[in-house]
Image: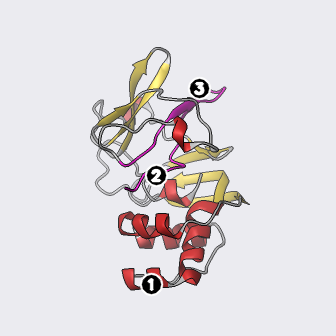
């Protein structure tokens, strides 16, 4: 799981008022090379929760990001490379994400966060930014905001053109189901036109 994904996930346990940001407990962290794209980072920057990114990067052992950042720093290639490394190249492979309010741990196995709620934790309706709801054709549907994302395409990191955009959303999501039946959301690519 990249910090890019972490920056959007929150706890949707019933009764939780502030489930963001999830605390990271890292057991295994991998670094995977990704092509540097400064324009992508400049367009993404306003959408980031900077403190969550800095705290997440530190939890993964990367302390090169400044405590505060503003748009004037986007002209520095050195700054953009640090953001690029933190957001896209650091991967939480094994560990957990912890709800800041309840302490509930969501395991991360093989880079996939399992955000499924226990029956008593679910409010039965989707009212959060990231929530699993119902079933369709044997696959779980994911909900991002108010948009349902069914199984749009096969998961793959190599070719963003294979994914279909959802409505006017800027996300290129797809879902995949691993052998354990855990729902997976691919947020590897972002169309920022």
Q: Camera-side residue: 6 or 171? A: 171
Going from the N terminus, do you reach mark 2 or mark 1 first?
1
Up/down of 7 relative to 42, above or below:
above
Percent of width and height locating residue 116: 48, 36
Q: Quadrant of residue 78?
A: bottom right
Q: Disc 3 designates what residue?
A: 181
Q: Quadrant of residue 120?
A: top left
Q: Is residue 114 visible?
A: yes
Q: Which mark is residue 85?
A: none
Image colouring: secondary structure
| Predominant secondary structure, magenta span | loop
Quote the CA–CA distance across marks 2 and 1. Answer: 21 Å
Q: What range of the chain is rendered magenta?
A: 170-193
> Could you tell me which residue is drawn at 46 percent across and 58 percent down?
22
User: Mark 1: which secondary structure?
Assistant: helix
Does 171 appear in magenta? yes
> Could you tell me which residue is drawn at 42 percent across and 82 percent down?
69
Q: Disc 2 designates what residue?
A: 190
Quote the CA–CA distance across marks 2 and 3. Answer: 25 Å
Count neighbours of disc 1 (C-alpha within 10 A) and say few if under 14, some if 14 to 19, many if 20 or more: few
Count neighbours of disc 2 (C-alpha within 10 A) and say few if under 14, some if 14 to 19, many if 20 or more: some
The quadrant of the rendering that contains the C terminus is bottom left
Left or right: where does residue 123 sit relative to residue 65?
A: left
Q: Is residue 185 visible?
A: no
Up/down of 82 relative to 176, above or below:
below
Going from the N terminus, do you reach mark 2 or mark 3 first?
3
Q: Disc 1 designates what residue?
A: 73
Percent of width and height locating residue 26: 65, 59
Percent of width and height locating residue 11: 40, 49
Left or right: where does residue 168 sit relative to residue 181?
A: left
């Amino acid at each position: 799981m990249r910090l890019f994904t972490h920056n959007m996930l929150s706890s949707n346990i019933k009764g939780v008022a502030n489930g963001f940001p999830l605390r990271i407990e890292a057991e295994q962290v991998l670094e995977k090379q990704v092509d540097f794209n400064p324009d992508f980072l400049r367009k993404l920057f306003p959408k980031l929760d900077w403190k969550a990114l800095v705290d997440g990067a530190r939890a993964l052992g990367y302390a090169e990001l400044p405590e505060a950042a503003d748009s004037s720093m986007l002209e520095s290639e050195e700054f953009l490379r640090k953001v690029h490394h933190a957001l896209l190249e650091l991967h939480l492979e094994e560990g957990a994400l912890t709800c800041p309010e309840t302490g509930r741990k969501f395991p991360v196995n093989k880079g996939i966060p399992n955000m499924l709620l226990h029956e008593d934790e679910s409010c039965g309706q989707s009212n959060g930014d990231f929530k699993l709801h119902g079933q369709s054709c044997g696959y779980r549907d994911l909900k991002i905001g108010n948009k349902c994302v069914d199984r749009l395409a096969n998961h793959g990191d190599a070719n963003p053109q294979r994914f279909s955009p959802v409505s006017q959303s800027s996300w290129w999501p797809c879902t995949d189901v691993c052998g354990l039946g855990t729902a997976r959301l691919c947020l590897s690519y972002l169309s920022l036109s």
